[in-house]
Image (spheres, rainbow, N blue to C red):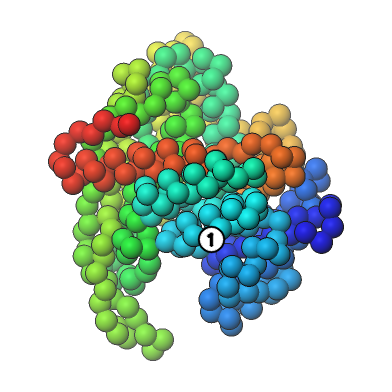
């Protein structure tokens, strides 16, 4: 850190998530003036040309191709690389006393996730996992309703995350289709979000997920790698799931179903959560993220509540009531919370410990699929 007032941020990864977090860092001083000052210090990646372009575009002061050299120079380390590079750099940063914000899923394997959780437990700095959908105002509002008992006793939870970017069998191979690098497919990439949201929303009331039955499916088992001239150079195997489903049961007997797919034709980024309790129900859809459908009391049908009032979570930082927010705002909110925890020395949720608990559920779904039977969680 060059002065006591500013946090220097080192960011590994400069593609989709690099852009989402860099945008969030740039927005913070304008919309959250009480956030700590940050400097977009070093952007880390392997391809020097692409990295230099990204650093220019995202407002970073410098670039580096070796994360090890950067850790000592920064106050906070963001790990936004592919899943297989989550563990080593994150653990090294935590061992050096540098706070870490890591993209989800925490790691490709439960063993790596456990090492990351342990490193975080031994470090005296925050280690957060970037489950950004917790920071949607409507999701925070849903949690307030559930915690206030408006839904009564929770009986049903349903979570579905649908995308369609792989339905074309000629869609190009990518690291997200490789078990070594990604750990799993739709399960870890999309299901991790659903499991985290469900645990965030209901587990204080239902207890943890106690047992589950899971199924994985791969519809296309190899995909083309294209050359720069657009012709197919080779085919590589797909070694992860394209879709998963799971039945879950909570400690209190509540039940749920989970699903994610990259083959859900027509659905681009459709994450829905539905919860039914003894006194009411609610429905959330990421495609309408400013709204929450709520059924309580004597209402006969769902009422669609616009969660855009100034007293709704995070909304007063932005625009006057009704001026809707989007996907990118969730990253600003989580960066605000994480960096405030870093500056204030406070805890941050979701922590590595929480992200490990998500990974336990993902791992159990894989175990259940392999064994063809229900699995009890530890
Ligand atoms: C996958 O397509 C993906 O980008 C996920 O990796 C993100 O976590 C999700 O928010 C959107 O979809």
Q: Quadrant of the N terminus?
A: bottom right
Q: Nearer the viewer, residue 111 or 257?
A: 111
Is there any visible trace of residue 265 in the rendered image? no
Q: Check disc 1 and report the residue beneath it.
A: 89
Q: Is residue 16 above or below residue 113?
A: below
State whether residue 198 appears in this view. Answer: yes
Residue pushed farthest left?
A: 372
Q: Is 291 left, or right, of 175 in this rendering?
A: right
- In this rendering, is residue 303 above or below 69? above
Q: Quadrant of residue 364?
A: top left
- Image quadrant for the C terminus? top left
Q: Residue at x 56, y 43 (%)?
A: 122
Which percent across, then down, holds residue 200?
49, 32
Label 1 Cα neighbours within 10 Å, binned few <14 / some 14-19 / many ≥20:
many
Residue most extreme to the bottom? 229
User: Looking at the image, which is closer to me, 199 or 99?
Assistant: 99
What residue is rendered at 28% in x and 76% in y? Answer: 224
In the picture, measured across the screen, residue 33 lies left or right of residue 375, that is right
Q: Position of residue 17 (x, y in %)?
A: 54, 60
């Amino acid at each position: 850190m060059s002065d006591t007032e500013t946090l220097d941020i080192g960011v590994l990864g400069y593609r989709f998530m690099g852009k989402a977090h860099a945008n969030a860092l740039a927005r913070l001083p304008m919309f959250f003036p009480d956030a700590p000052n940050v400097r977009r210090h070093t952007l880390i990646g392997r391809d020097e040309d692409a990295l230099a372009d990204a650093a220019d575009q995202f407002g970073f002061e410098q670039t580096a191709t070796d994360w090890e050299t950067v850790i000592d120079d920064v106050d906070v380390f963001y790990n936004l690389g592919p899943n297989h590079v989550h563990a080593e750099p994150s653990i090294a940063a935590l061992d050096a006393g540098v706070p870490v914000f890591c993209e989800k899923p925490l790691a490709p394997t439960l063993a790596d996730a456990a090492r990351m959780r342990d490193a975080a437990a031994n470090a005296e700095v925050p280690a957060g996992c970037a489950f950004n959908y917790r920071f949607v105002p409507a999701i925070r509002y849903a949690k307030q309703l559930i915690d206030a008992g408006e839904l009564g006793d929770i009986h049903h939870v349903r979570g579905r995350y649908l995308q369609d970017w792989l339905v074309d069998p000629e869609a190009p191979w990518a690291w997200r289709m490789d078990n070594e690098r990604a750990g799993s497919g739709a399960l870890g990439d999309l299901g991790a979000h659903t499991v985290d949201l469900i645990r965030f929303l209901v587990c204080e009331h239902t207890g943890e997920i106690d047992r589950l039955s899971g199924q994985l499916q791969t519809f296309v088992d190899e995909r083309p790698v294209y050359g720069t001239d657009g012709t197919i150079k080779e085919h590589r195997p797909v070694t992860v799931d394209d879709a998963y489903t799971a039945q879950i049961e909570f400690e209190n007997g509540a039940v749920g179903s989970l699903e994610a797919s990259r083959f859900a034709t027509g659905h681009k980024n459709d994450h829905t959560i539905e919860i039914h309790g003894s006194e009411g129900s609610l429905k959330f859809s990421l495609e309408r993220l400013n709204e929450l459908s709520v059924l309580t009391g004597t209402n006969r049908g769902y009422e669609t509540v616009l969660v855009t009032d100034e007293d709704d979570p995070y909304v007063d930082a932005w625009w006057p009531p009704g001026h809707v927010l989007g996907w990118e705002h969730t990253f600003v909110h989580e960066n605000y919370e994480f960096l405030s925890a870093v500056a204030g020395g406070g805890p941050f949720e979701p922590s590595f410990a929480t992200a490990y608990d998500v990974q336990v559920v993902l791992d159990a779904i894989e175990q259940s699929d392999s064994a063809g039977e229900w699995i009890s969680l530890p």
